[in-house]
Image (spheres, rainbow, N blue to C red):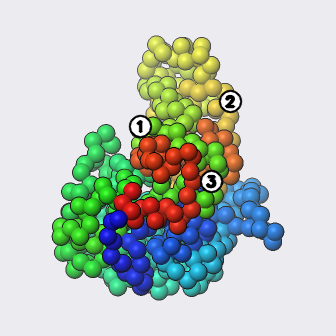
Amino acid sequence: MIKLDLQKFSDAFILPLVEGGKGISISNGETCGAWAAAGSVGTFSAVNADSYDENGEIIPQIYQGESRQQRHRELVDYAVAGGIAQAKIARERSNGHGRIHMNVLWEMGACEEILHRILEGAKGCVHGLVCGAGMPYNLGEIASKFSVYYYPIISSARAFSALFRRSFKNTRDLLGGVVYEDPWLAGGHNGLSNAEDPLKPTNPYLRLVELRRIMNDFALQAIPIIIAGGVWWLSEWEDYINNNELGLVAFQFGTRSILTTECPVSKAWQSKLMTLKRGDVKLTPLSPTGFYSSAICNRMLEDLLELQKRQVAVVENSQATVIASGREVSIATTKEVQTWIDDGFSAAMLTPSNTVIFVTPRQRDKILRDQKDCCGCLSKCRFSSWCQHKGSTGNIPDPRSFCIQKSLQGAAHGGNLEQNLLFAGHMAYRYGEDPFYANNFIPTTKQLIERILSGH
């Protein structure tokens, strides 16, 4: 057994074990309530969360608006209804135990409005706000308005320092913890800076020591650091517990919490997790958010990675030309282009990087359809050129990315797992190696937490 002292989270002393938030519709009220009922921190995602009809059936998020702005307003209303529904389910399932946290992406469309409306509509259900994927300068202010705690997700001491100096110092009494999400180990969107090499991970311990040093400079010794990314067996992290250099720490489980009976993902998804090998999770820059992200390498991801290779630069006054996105452009070379065309990749599309990519006509049609159907799920999107403040980013849509909202909705609601995005942390391969999951055993959340507390 690993000895973990109870810690204060959102004004309650509980186990320092945290469910990692996973959208869309992966961490929901059922999973959150189960983690809270077990005396720890449950987290539901308010990113395109599911809502239900009078019969308890999931309401499909179908968009009727003719304009992108109209569809964006529909998306916001869906998100609010879903967030309120999941918060109430989590409260009911928790039986008054543990803590209920809500996770959002700061760069999701209309994030601040969605937060306000969910917290107003689910008063008393949510104890803490967890937020990453961007610099959430207004997070503390929103938490203060509703008297809930807040937990920023950061990947470096530098990022936290900037947030605290500019904003969080004014609401420090409600800062419940700081989530350190390792950019080379965690699943989903990762906070790699431009100065960091995605192929050269740095030691998480050293990054945590630097974060604690910065926090101590701000007199935040009593605030825990929640370690996220790469955590599987606590026995492998014993040196981080009761460590004077790190101070108070807690542990977040994102990918590992998918394989529980309460998690709503399909049986096929859970079975796929059992088959993963080391290296099957890839860190790529493909997300339309502009952030790096980690996901299971499937046919969709392979196609996107291959697409990046079928690319040539646009130049002036070249003898080599091609019809791309409906107009003739000069390209640097035709050396490989004819081979791509012969292989079926005969549709050329312009990119905002002043290049041309080659895809099949079917791929082109899907890209154009998805771009046309944009509902503004992000504050700004390089795939569709949507920007919620200006209407457009000013760039042409980037066909080298994809519609993340459609893909995550598809993965969560019965879509083809080879053709949709499956976020996962880089330790996911351990499902197949961990004897706890032998013979395809799927635990309840309570059983998983008991196993975690055993050290394994």
Judge from the rendering whether residue 295 lies leftward or rightward of residue 25; answer left or right: left
Residue 239 sits in which quadrant? bottom left
Q: Which residue carries the number 3 mark? A: 265
Viewer-closest of 40 and 162: 40
> Left or right of 178: which side holds 335?
right
Residue visible at 64% across and 48% down in the picture: 267
**Residue 438, labelled with which disc?**
none
Figure check: 165 above or below 257? below
Q: What residue type is labelled 2?
A: Arg
Judge whether 330 appears above or below 67 on screen.
above
Marks 2 and 3, how far apart in space? 29 Å
Instruction: Residue at 52%, 67% (x, y): give it.
Output: 446
Residue situated in front as seen by the camera: 278 or 4: 4
Q: Which of marks 1 and 2 is in front?
A: 1
- Horizontal and vertical percent for residue 26? 58, 58
Q: Name the residue under label 2.
A: 362
